[in-house]
Image: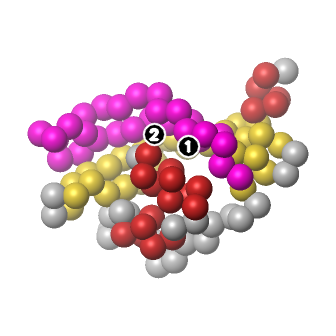
Amino acid sequence: MCARYAAYVVGDVDFLLRTWDPTTRPDRLAIDDARVWLGLEVLGTDAGTMFDQEGTVTFAATFSAGPTAMQLRERSRFHRVDGRWVYVDAELAELVDVDEERA
């Protein structure tokens, strides 16, 4: 999860596509250059140990979009393909305006 977040930060589309499950991976991926990623907080995990074949990571990733601070909150599903963890999809995704939530 942290490696995929870092790939979004630096715009490494090739890494993101390589670590995406082939059955759910898009043909191409565009990264919004206007987003400045500010931080990642892993809120929880379920399974995903070296003994598991699947697992989830719940996280909040904060970014700025112009003058507005936003947060992507998601529970991502991962599973192993040929022994490597790959991103499958998001079970829950929510985009929150951080400034509005603080008010």
Start and end of the magenta stretch? Answer: 36-62
**Contact flag, marks 2 and 1 (Cβ < 8 Å):** yes
Instruction: Say whether residue 100 is magenta.
Output: no
Residue 20 is labelled as: none
Q: Residue at x 47, y 28 (%)?
A: 43
Residue 54, position as x, y percentages in the image: 23, 45
Q: Residue at x 37, y 55 (%)?
A: 87
**Which residue type does callout 1 highlight?**
Ala
According to the image, label 1 marks what residue? 93
**Main SS, magenta residues:** strand
In the rendered image, the residue lying farthest to the top is: 103
According to the image, label 2 marks what residue? 75
Q: What is the count of numbered marks?
A: 2
In the rendered image, the residue lying farthest to the left is: 51
- State how far apart marks 2 and 1 are (Cα): 7 Å
Q: Residue at x 35, y 39 (%)?
A: 56
- How crowded pointer 1 is (Cα within 10 Å; few <14, some 14-19, many 20+) is rated as some
Secondary element under disc 1, as helix, strand or loop, is strand
**Which residue type does callout 2 highlight?**
Arg
Q: Is 80 drawn above or below residue 43 in the view shown?
A: below
* Residue 68 appears left or right of 60: right
Q: Is 42 drawn above or below residue 30 in the view shown?
A: above
